[in-house]
Image (tube, helix red, strand yellow):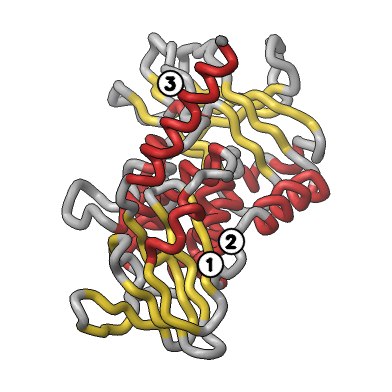
Amino acid sequence: MKKFKVLILMIFLSVIAFSQDNSFLIYNFKGNVSVIENNAETKAKIGKILNSNTKIKVSAGSIITMVCDQAAMFTINKAGSYTLSQFKDSCVTHSSSMSANYFRYVWNQMTSHGEGSPGSNRKMYMSTVGAVSRSVNNIWIDPRLDTINYSSGSFPLAWKSYSDAKEFQFYLYDKPDATNPIYKTTTKVMQVPITSILKYMKPGNTYYWTTAVKGETNDETKVLSYTTKEAYETVLNKLKANGPAYEGEAEQAFRIAFSLEDARYLSEAYQYYLKAAKLKSDIWLYRSTMMSFKKDYDIK
């Protein structure tokens, strides 16, 4: 009897899901693709929201990828005219939570022009946003820097100060409970480039860093994992493989950048944000997110 009730509930939920009207967002397209609404035909436009009654006309050799209801993605690559209600079954989420979070982020940003600073709320859609800082001294380090995975590129280890101090001390350790740093330096700027400390580290090892106002101490350390190129390539190839059936180079770069940032590969994420913004400078989301990333992590 219990199994029967569960079956009935599942059928009921399925009926509700398929009776709901879906919304679709144009994520990317190539070639000649048009939208037919209220008997009026216009060219497809990235970021446009459509309902289930809208028709999509795909010419021979053309292709379009769409996001449905913020969390699922599908591609139409066969010439023809389609009513979007035909793709209701494609709106069922089969993606990982990471992919679903990315789709929701893109949907939100492309449909909320003028609401806040574009690209500034990425961490709302990420699974690794960092812990609340426990620091009780004059230094504040963004929680998103709690753990950094690093393989290559230039990226700053940055912080803020609550005081008017002019000098700061930076410490790098090879163990979480070490008392003697393997490297330390005094600086007048509130950041240290990772490239400047690479000679003290070896790929495949994990390190710990902190900073303090000169003459003070700070026992709150952050993790810096210096991953091997092979380990990073494994992550990158998996992200590339998890993309939709069709994805332009700029769209792929932006998706990978978002995913790498969530995986704490911040230096590498920045390179992909730059790539996306350069490839399609007319897509405001790509450039605004890149600029927001630079601001968040104090990249000069």
Question: Is the C-beta separation of discs 1 and 2 under 8 Å?
Answer: yes
| Amino acid type, callout 3 | Val
Could you tell me if the residues under marks 1 and 3 are in contact, i.e. CB atoms within 8 Å?
no
Q: Residue at x 56, y 68 (%)?
A: 247
Q: Position of residue 272 (x, y in %)?
A: 55, 60
Residue 28 placement, left or right of 119: right
Q: Secondary structure at mark 2?
A: loop
Q: Position of residue 32 (x, y in %)?
A: 43, 88
Q: Pointer 1: what residue?
A: 75
Depth check, front residue: 106 or 256? 106
Q: Secondary structure at mark 3?
A: strand
Q: Amino acid at mark 1?
A: Thr
Q: Nearer the viewer, residue 127 or 147?
A: 127
Position of residue 24 relative to residue 171, above or below, is: below
Residue under numbered circle 2: 244
Labels 1 and 2: the sequence-earlier one: 1
In the image, what residue type sits under mark 2? Pro
Q: Quadrant of residue 2?
A: top right
Q: Residue at x 58, y 70 (%)?
A: 246
- Real-space Cα distance between discs 2 and 3? 48 Å
